[in-house]
Amino acid sequence: MMNWANLYSAVRTGDDNRKKAAKDHVRTSFQRDYDRIIFSSAFRRLQNKTQVFPLPGAVFVHNRLTHSLEVASVGRSLGKHVGDVIADKYSNESEGFRDFYRYELPSVIAAACLAHDIGNPPFGHSGEDAIRTYFSGLEGEAKNIIHSELSTAQLKDLQLFEGNSNALRVLTHNFNNQSEGGYKLTYTTLASIVKYPCGSADGFNKKTGLIATKKSGFFTGEYDTWLSIASELDIPKKDGYETVHARHPFVYLTEAADDICYRIIDMEDAHRLGIVSIDKIKELFLPFFENSGTYLTWEYVLGMLYKMSDPNRQVEYIRAVWIGLMTEKLANAFIDNEAALLQGTLEQDLLKCLPEREQDLIKAINDFSFRYIYNYKSVVEIELAGYNVIGGLLKEFVHAVLHPNESKSFKMLQLVSKQFPISGDRKNLFSDIQSVVDFISGMTDLYAIDVYRKITGITIPEIR
C-alpha cells in the first residue's frame, strides 16, 4: 500500500546522489520542474502541433501548447484543493509533509500537466496511429530485417507507439547530450505523467480490467528509469505482470485536468468555427448546474448569460464556470477515493467516479463531440494528411537506416538532427530506428509537411 509521505521526493533523473532538498533559495525543486519544461524547445514546439482543428487558420483555435497551459492552470487548482485537504487531515505529520501538500503539490500537478502532451507526434492522435500503422504493416525486405534484428519488446515499442510513453522518453533520455537524465525533473513530477504504468508488451490490453494496461507509459529503453522512480516513491508492481505497476495517485489529478479542459475547450473552438451553436453548448453543459451544491446554480448561471449579448462571451462564461465546478467535483472525487488510490486499486479515472447522472451528461458530451467535432471534415482531412506525411517520412528515413551505404540514404540521414545519433551499424538497428522516430515525432506539423514535400520532390528547396 502506498503512503502519502513516500509519494514525493526531490530526487531527479541524472542525480549523482540521493539529495532530498533543492539548493535554489528562490525556487523549490518542483517549481524548477515547471520552469524547465516551459522553457524547453520540446514544449515550445507544441505551439505548432494540432490539438483538434487544423493549424493555422483565420480563426484562432487551440494548439497543443495553449491546451497544455490551460490544463496546467486547472491542474494547479486541483493540486491546491487536494493538497490542502491532505495537509489538514494529516496534521500530525512532519512540517515538511504538510508544506509539500499545502504548497508544492500544485506546482507538481501544474508541471505534469504542462508536459502531458510533450511526447505527441505531429497531427495529434493520427500521428500516433500513422507510426503504429507503418511498423505494423512492414513488408518485404524491411520487414525481414527489422523483425529478425529486434526483440519482441522492441517491436512492440514501434508497433504500439504511444505519445504517453514518448513523453517520458523526451523528458528523461539524454539523446546526444553529455549529461544524463534529460531535463532532470524530479521523480515526483515524472510519476505524475505516467498515466499507463506498463511497457508496450503488456499494454494496449483492456481485457485485464486494469487502467494501467489501457495503453503504455514507457518504452523498453526507459524501463530502468521507471523502475528507479517506482522504487523511490514506493509504487507497487501489479501481481502477475512483468512491467505493470499501480498508478501514482497524482496521475489522476493530471488526467482530470486534461479531461476537464478538452471537453469544453474543443467545444469552444468548434463554436468559434461555426460548427456548434451556442444553444447546443447550453444544452450540453448547463444541466451540470442543476443541484450543483454551490452558488453556481442553474438560475444564477442563466441569469449571468442573459446579461451577455455576444455568443462568444457566453461560451467563455460557460467554459469558466464549468471548469470551476468540475475542478471542485473531481478534487472531491479524489479525496473520496483516497483508500483505493493508496492501495493502487482505483481502475477508473475520476470522471467515472462521479454520480451516474453526471456520467450520463459527460457521455452526451463525448458522443456529440465524436460525431460532430472529431469527425468534422477538416479534422478528418488533417488526420489523413498526417497518415500520409508521417508514413512517407518513416518509409524514406527507415529505408536510409537499413541501407546507409546507398547514395540517397547518406543524404537522407544528413537531414536528421545530430541530437538523434544514427550509427549505421546493424548491431544498433533499434536505437537507429528510434532516433528516426524521435526526429519525426518531435517535428511540428508544418515542419513535417515541409520535409515531406522536399524529400518527395513536391516542393523544390530554395538555396539559402
Image (cartoon, grey):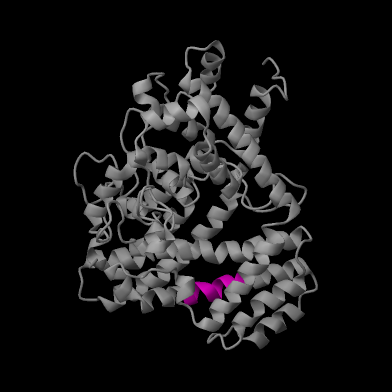
Task: Identify the residue at horizontal 42%, vertical 50% (top origin).
Answer: 34
Q: Residue at x 33, y 61 (%)?
A: 248
Viewer-side residue, 411 vs 213: 213
- Residue 212 appears at what percent x and percent y? 38, 59
Write the start and end of the magenta stretch as one range.
Answer: 320-329
Q: Is residue 79 left or right of residue 318?
A: left
Which quadrant of the figure has residue 306? bottom right
The percent position of residue 407, horizontal first and vertical second, equals 54, 10
Say which quadrant the C terminus sits in: top right
- Residue visible at 74% across and 73% down in the picture: 280
Query: Can residue 416 be seen from the camera position used here?
Result: no
Residue 153 vertical position relative to residue 268 in the rendered view, above or below: above
- Magenta run includes residue 327: yes
In the image, residue 96 above or below residue 183: below
In the rendered view, does 329 fall on the left or right side of 201? right
- Residue 452 placement (x, y as % from top left): 64, 29
Q: Quadrant of residue 270?
A: bottom right
The quadrant holding residue 335 is: bottom left
